[in-house]
Amino acid sequence: MKSLLARGSELSSSKEQFRILSEVSERKALPLFAEKLQESGLFPLFPTGVDILQVNVGKLCNQTCKHCHVDAGPDRKEIMSKETMQECLVALASPKISTLDITGGAPEMNPNFRWFVEEASKLGKKIMVRCNLTIVLAGEKYRDLPEFFAKHKVEVVSSLPYFQKRRTDAQRGEGVFDRSVEALKKLNEVGYGVPGSGIVLNLVYNPGGAFLPGGQSTLESDFKRELKENFGVQFNSLFAITNMPISRFLEFLLESGNLDSYLEKIVTSFNPLAAAGVMCRNTLSVGWDGSLYDCDFNQMLDMQLEGEVTKISDFNQASLDKRKIRLEQHCYGCTAGAGSSCGGSLA
């Protein structure tokens, strides 16, 4: 199976992904996602209001994870400029937006990352950073990140596929588990995950195969017990996130022969309660070049917002709150079972 990423531009890759999902849906007679929403009285899907500004500051990363929907890696050149970050800060000043969610790649590798956090902190907003943990050990310039995060009371959200070395390394690369544990200990040392410290460390679990995540509360209990007993590591909450059938995970599904069964699984597991709370309803996604999207997954599929406002430089809350959210078959991933968002299960 030829890699999706080797087929040309990201746009052509996105078109190819749409084609593949459409072909499977037709062959398996699976309903369109919009049809399912219509049955639930949720179509067309509108925002409840922009509460979270999720900003992808670039695709550069020190890791190349098998499940990464961003296709991030050490060779990526897409980096958000300081000027675009300033435009994000202007939008963030809106009184209706409570949270800045910074993602990547490894967002810390953007040369203006610390400036961005410092300026956002002055606005009094909640700041979240999606940290891959190993960046803390990636060189001298990153070693004080735990202290920097703590100083600005940044909520750290970090992916850890499992509490065992074999399964984590299989998904994220050899040696990642040991380095992740070392980084978690450094975060614990400055108070992250420690009860009463006031600074929050949350972990993210993604299934390692073609299946939905188990119950979030059970997984959280297992992770807390195993990490505490075996490594002395503490954290606050665990977010269980379903893998979307796009990008590298789509490649895995194709290569392993699991695409048909996985797509059928997320379609038949559609949960209208989860659909009502999907993250695209209260989150606005900003690409590295300032383009706007309904969610991070749509961003990676080049599905820009519908409507007049398509760039963060033209941010207009009233207009954005009235837009229709764009939908495709991959959206089933957010509504399957207990649902899935950047904050974990929904129902």
Image (cartoon, grey):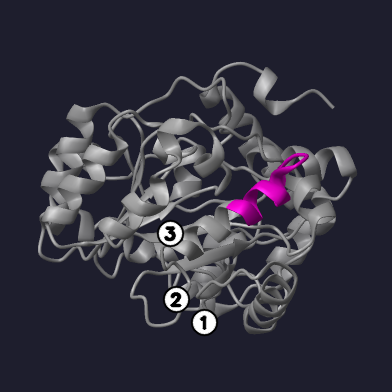
The answer for how far apart the CA atoms under marks 1 and 2 are is 5 Å
- Residue 342 in view, yes or no: no
Left or right of 102 on screen, residue 219: right
Q: Position of residue 110 (x, y in %)?
A: 37, 31
Residue farthest toward the right in the current orientation of the protein: 257
Q: Which residue is mark 1?
A: 273
Q: Which residue is mark 3?
A: 156
Regarding mark 1 in the picture, which secondary structure is present there? helix
Contact? badges 1 and 2 (CB < 8 Å): yes
Q: Which residue is at the front of the view, 49 or 176?
A: 176
Disc 3 marks a residue whose amino acid type is: Val
Earlier sequence position, callout 3 versus callout 2: 3
The structure residue drawn at horizontal position 58% and vertical position 43%, both measured from the top left corner, is 134
Disc 1 marks a residue whose amino acid type is: Leu
Magenta stretch, residue numbers? 172-182
In the depicted structure, whether residue 283 falls above or below residue 289: below
The structure residue drawn at horizontal position 70% and vertical position 66%, both measured from the top left corner, is 231
The structure residue drawn at horizontal position 55% and vertical position 74%, both measured from the top left corner, is 345
In the depicted structure, whether residue 163 falls above or below residue 300: below
The residue mark sitting in front, 3 or 2, is 3
Q: Is residue 13 magenta?
A: no
